[in-house]
Image: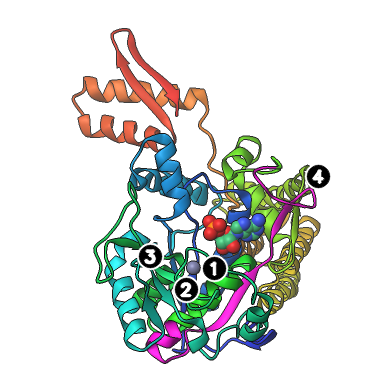
């Protein structure tokens, strides 16, 4: 399996630190608002990559943080007259709902910056001891970028050139030694959340969070660190500077960055109003369509979001789901038939492996989901051509398994929860009434739970039982 490594600017064979295991860290969102569709891109593409590594047999420890202390969160809290913690708690919950809708699996751990402050203070202390950081008179602690000789290795920037370009910038009001020194610890301002520290009360800078959480949950050297390409500089460059100076070891071996999502060929921006939250998209489309749309491009390419492209994604997804539904229907019809594949079916089934091989080759080539999706379309076409009511159940089952496996790697759900019909609901409610009359409360409760699981809520009223869909 090859991965394009931003650090070396080439595709490299993936060799994990520990055989069969992958330690992966993905920078998560700052939670001050509903996530937008740009934030959804790294979530979807790296979730897909995680699924593919698991498909290949790796045990993946996947960590993704929530940045829950930050200027934007504090500003929002002040606007709403709330506590910053309330704001972040609310948007973490909303973000998790969106993730579920997009079928993005929860990470192995979702650490919160505010719960890792001790680790951050400890790493900052080590950096000061080693001469890589200094506390200024106002209580700000800065990282001394000039001391870290590899600074710029990820973004391929040369610190001296950067400094030359900034020679005339006066850093007024700041007590930095150098304009490229960045903040590790900020002193408290009135009305802001703060923690005690050896440098006075304050809060951590953004970059130190990820260095500390990655180390705590994955160790000093990890396999893969990922995020959007806007994070390469300065965020990831600074993470490397902090972690490698503190541990003396390589921080991450492979760096993966997704390209940006634009809207109608323009950068998304709130001021221009060309901006969508995932929630807004969910009003119009099943979020599976958004997921499928994201996967139809290579993760490193810029991707343009438009109505037409979403419609095309919807149609494409529909084609796959129609084939999956057809197989499911056929299998239901043949539920009690014990049969085997004919020899012709045997060879057809063997031939269909070609699509799975193509799928794997695409995913092995730096997670090329665009080509992997094409391989799924080829398999769908093969199914449409070769399966009919005359096919054996065994043949339909095998092809169904193959299709489900590939869709599972892409995180595409092929089996829709079938909505219960009104009569089925009424019938179960009647059965529940009977059970209650017979004092079989266990059965009555079981029916209520069964209905609740399908989103049907019951209400006992004086006139009888009423129900509604949640
Ligand atoms: P943020 O909350 O801004 O730190 O962003 C969380 C993640 O979303 C980071 O990995 C960003 O790089 C990524 N991201 C933000 N905007 C976009 C966009 N328009 N396209 C793709 N990724 C984005
Ligand atoms: Zn980060």
- The answer to whether any part of residue 196 appears in the image is yes
* Camera-nearest label, 4 or 2: 2
| C-alpha separation, residue under disc 3 versus residue under disc 2 | 35 Å
Residue identifier under label 3: 109
Give the answer, above or below, for where 392 lies relative to 333.
below
Q: How is the image coloured?
A: rainbow
Give the percent coordinates (x, y) of residue 182.
48, 72
Q: Are marks 1 and 3 in contact (CB under 8 Å)?
A: no
Q: Quadrant of residue 116?
A: bottom left
Few, some or many C-alpha atoms within 10 Å of disc 3 (few <14, some 14-19, many ≥20)?
few
Q: Cβ–Cβ below 8 Å for labels 4 and 3? A: no
Secondary structure beneath dot 3 equals: loop
The stretch of residues the image draws in magenta is: 243-271
Circle 2 is placed at which residue position? 176
Which badge, 1 or 3, is on the more N-terminal residue? 3
Residue 369 in the magenta stretch? The answer is no
Q: Position of residue 431 (x, y in %)?
A: 34, 25
Quadrant of the frame with the N terminus: bottom right
Where is residue 413 shown, x and y percent of the image? 58, 53
- Mark 3 vs mark 2: give the one in front: 2
The 10 Å Cα crowd at callout 2, few under 14, some 14 to 19, many 20 or more, is many
Q: Which residue occupies 45% across, 65% down?
A: 206
Tags 3 and 2 in contact by the CB under 8 Å rule? no
Q: Nearer the viewer, residue 244 or 137?
A: 137
Find disc 1 in the rendering and name its residue. Answer: 171
Mark 1 and mark 4: span between their CA atoms? 47 Å
Query: Do the residues bearing badges 2 and 1 touch, measured as CB atoms within 8 Å?
Result: yes
- The earlier-in-sequence mark between 3 and 2 is 3
Residue situated in front as seen by the camera: 229 or 160: 160
The Cα atoms of the two marked residues, 4 and 2, are separated by 50 Å
């Amino acid at each position: 399996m090859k991965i394009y490594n931003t650090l070396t600017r080439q595709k490299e064979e993936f060799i994990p630190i520990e055989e069969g295991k992958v330690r992966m860290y993905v920078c998560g969102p700052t939670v001050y608002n509903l996530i937008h569709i740009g934030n959804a891109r790294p979530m979807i593409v790296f979730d897909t990559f995680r699924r593919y590594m698991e498909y290949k047999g790796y045990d993946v420890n996947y960590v993704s943080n929530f940045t829950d202390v930050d200027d934007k969160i504090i500003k929002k809290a002040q606007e709403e007259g709330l506590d910053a913690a309330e704001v972040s708690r609310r948007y973490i919950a909303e973000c998790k709902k969106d993730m579920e809708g997009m079928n993005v699996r929860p990470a192995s751990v979702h650490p919160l910056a505010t719960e890792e402050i001790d680790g951050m203070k400890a790493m900052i202390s080590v950096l000061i001891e080693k001469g890589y950081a200094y506390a200024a008179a106002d209580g700000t602690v800065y990282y001394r970028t000039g001391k870290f000789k590899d600074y710029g290795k990820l973004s391929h920037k040369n610190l001296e050139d950067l400094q030359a370009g900034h020679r005339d910038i006066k850093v007024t009001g700041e007590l930095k030694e150098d304009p490229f020194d960045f903040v590790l610890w900020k002193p408290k301002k009135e009305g802001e959340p703060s923690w005690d520290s050896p440098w006075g009360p304050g809060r951590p800078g953004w970059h130190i969070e990820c260095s500390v959480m990655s180390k705590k949950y994955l160790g000093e050297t990890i396999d893969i660190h990922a995020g959007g390409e806007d994070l390469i500089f300065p965020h990831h460059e600074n993470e490397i500077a902090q972690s490698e100076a503190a541990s003396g070891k390589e921080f991450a071996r492979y760096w993966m960055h997704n390209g940006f999502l634009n809207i109608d060929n323009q950068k998304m921006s709130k001021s221009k109003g060309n901006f969508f939250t995932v929630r807004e998209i969910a009003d119009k489309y099943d979020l599976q369509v958004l997921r499928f749309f994201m996967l139809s491009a290579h993760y490193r390419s810029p991707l343009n979001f438009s109505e037409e492209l979403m419609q095309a994604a919807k149609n494409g997804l529909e084609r796959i789901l129609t084939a999956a539904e057809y197989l499911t229907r056929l299998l239901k019809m043949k539920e009690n038939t014990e049969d085997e594949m004919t020899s012709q079916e045997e060879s057809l089934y063997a031939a269909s492996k070609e699509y799975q091989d193509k799928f794997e080759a695409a995913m092995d080539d730096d997670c090329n989901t665009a080509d992997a999706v094409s391989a799924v379309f080829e398999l769908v076409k093969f199914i449409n051509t070769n399966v009919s009511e005359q096919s054996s159940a065994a043949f339909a089952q095998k092809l169904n398994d193959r299709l489900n496996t590939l869709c599972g790697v892409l995180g595409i759900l092929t089996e829709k929860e079938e909505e219960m019909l009104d009569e089925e609901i009424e019938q179960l409610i009647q059965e529940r009434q009977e059970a209650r009359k017979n004092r079989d409360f266990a059965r009555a409760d079981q029916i209520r739970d069964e209905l609740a699981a399908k989103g049907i809520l019951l209400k006992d009223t004086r006139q009888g039982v009423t129900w509604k869909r949640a």
